[in-house]
């Protein structure tokens, strides 16, 4: 195990049931060719390995706070429709950069189009759109692997385009303008390789579940302006803590869909909210297309798409102006599964997602 990994293994890994420390000369080969679980369920599952992450700092950009984090290069899967494509680590990949974006006052994590340019070392090693991603330790974020040839000083410029969701209440009118966040950081291979890397006990690999989300205090720091910032987790509230009347919760494709009804001025009256989340950690699932059909005694009383929405109390969800009555049957259609790239443990989940029905 490397130096920091040896000293911090207990705090980093908690009760995750991890085993198999890598030696300092084995670290690179371990993360470049990490084992993959062979018998994977069509659900969220415990992966074969986990690594520590570090942060280059935080920047305020208009109504947003943006963080830039790093870890070893990662294998991940992109999604097109319901088809997955595995992106392997290449020989040139030097690190995996990750950005998180949230509305500063509420702490609500925001889905958006995030583009990044990295300049330094007499070149531009990265210029493009970051993948919206889902990982078990980081939750929802944006990221990609970077091929950086030289150590030294770099500048990452992130452009956050308008949110892929409408804001309501205290978030109404916000999140609609593009913002820019700039980070100066030093790329040092020793710092990256000093991050902890662990193999999970074979008896746990492939079991349905999720590793615990990382707390910001667990992250290593490599310069940058950290100040008093705290990175919020990309979770949505537990079902029992959502405002309004809890109608029910159902699973589809291993995602949990929590449905509530409320009547509030910020929604202009009666409102139906659908809050999809990962099954164990409650990580939000944006970049979906949902629609609903509400019937009474077999007759349709409402039928429309659900709008991606950000609310300080509900967090990220999908909603529509619906006044429910006793005896209504609510059918939620998943017209498009989450178009989010996934790290190990999520690539087989949230793909086949049949409709769900809940009776009011």
Image: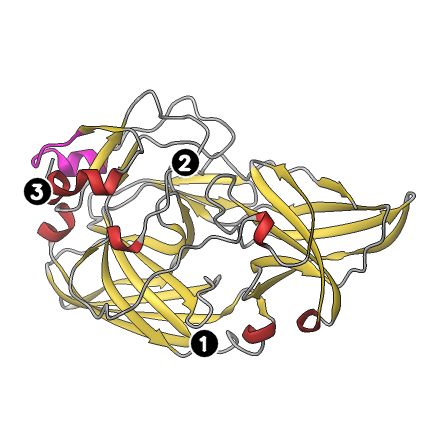
Q: Name the residue under label 3.
A: 3
Q: What element carries label 2?
A: loop
Q: Quadrant of residue 137?
A: top left
Q: Name the residue under label 2.
A: 345
Position of residue 82 measured from the top left corner of the image (x, y, whole percent): 56, 41
Please tell me whether residue 117 is drawn above or below residue 210 in the rendered image. below
The residue located at (62%, 37%) in the rendering is 251
Figure disc tally: 3
Give the residues in magenta: 21-31
Q: How far apart are marks 3 and 1 (CA)?
A: 41 Å
Q: Does the magenta stretch include residue 68?
A: no
Q: Which of marks 2 and 3 is nearer the N terminus?
A: 3
Q: Is mark 3 on a helix, strand or loop?
A: helix
In this view, the mark in front (2 or 3):
3
34 sits left or right of 171 in the view = left
261 sits left or right of 183 in the view = right
Which dot marks residue 178?
1
The residue located at (40%, 55%) in the rendering is 233
In this view, the mark in front (3 or 1):
3
Please tell me whether residue 197 is drawn above or below residue 246 in the rendered image. above
Q: Distance between the residues labelled 1 and 2?
A: 32 Å
Please tell me whether residue 90 is drawn above or below residue 122 in the rendered image. above
Q: Distance between the residues labelled 2 and 3?
A: 27 Å
Report if the CB atoms under discs 3 and 1 are less than 8 Å apart: no
Position of residue 209 measured from the top left corner of the image (x, y, whole percent): 44, 33
Q: Is mark 1 on a helix, strand or loop?
A: loop
């Amino acid at each position: 195990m490397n130096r920091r990994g040896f000293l911090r293994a207990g705090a980093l890994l908690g009760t995750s049931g991890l085993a198999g420390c890598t030696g300092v000369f084995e670290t690179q080969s371990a993360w470049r060719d990490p084992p993959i679980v062979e018998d994977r369920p069509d659900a969220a599952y415990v992966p074969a390995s986990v690594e520590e992450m570090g942060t280059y700092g935080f920047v305020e950009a208009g109504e947003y706070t943006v963080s830039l984090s790093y870890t070893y290069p990662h294998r991940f899967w992109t999604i097109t429709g319901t088809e997955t494509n595995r992106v392997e680590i290449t020989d040139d990949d030097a690190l995996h950069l990750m950005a998180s974006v949230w509305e500063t006052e509420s702490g609500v994590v925001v889905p958006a189009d995030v583009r990044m340019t990295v300049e330094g070392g007499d070149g531009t090693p990265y210029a493009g759109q970051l993948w919206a991603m889902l990982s078990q330790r980081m939750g929802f974020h944006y990221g990609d692997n970077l091929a950086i040839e030289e150590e030294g000083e770099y500048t990452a410029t992130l452009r956050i385009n308008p949110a892929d969701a409408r804001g309501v209440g205290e978030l109404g009118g916000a999140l609609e303008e593009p913002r820019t966040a700039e980070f100066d950081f030093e790329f040092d291979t020793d710092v990256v390789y000093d991050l902890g890397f662990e193999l999970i006990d074979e008896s746990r690999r492939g079991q349905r579940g999720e590793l615990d989300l990382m707390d910001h205090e667990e992250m290593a720091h490599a310069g940058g302006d950290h100040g008093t910032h705290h990175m919020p987790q990309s979770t949505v509230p537990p079902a029992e803590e959502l405002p309004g009347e809890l109608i029910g919760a159902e699973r589809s494709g291993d995602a949990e869909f929590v449905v509530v009804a409320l009547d509030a001025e910020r929604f202009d009256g009666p409102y139906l909210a659908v809050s999809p989340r990962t099954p164990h950690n409650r990580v939000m699932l944006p970049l979906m297309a949902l629609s609903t059909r509400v019937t009474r005694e077999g007759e349709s009383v409402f039928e429309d798409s659900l709008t991606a929405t950000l609310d300080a109390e509900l967090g990220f969800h999908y909603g529509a102006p619906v006044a429910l009555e006793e005896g209504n049957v609510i059918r939620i259609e998943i017209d498009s599964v989450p178009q989010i790239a996934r790290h190990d443990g999520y690539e087989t989940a949230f793909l086949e997602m049949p409709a769900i029905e809940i009776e009011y």
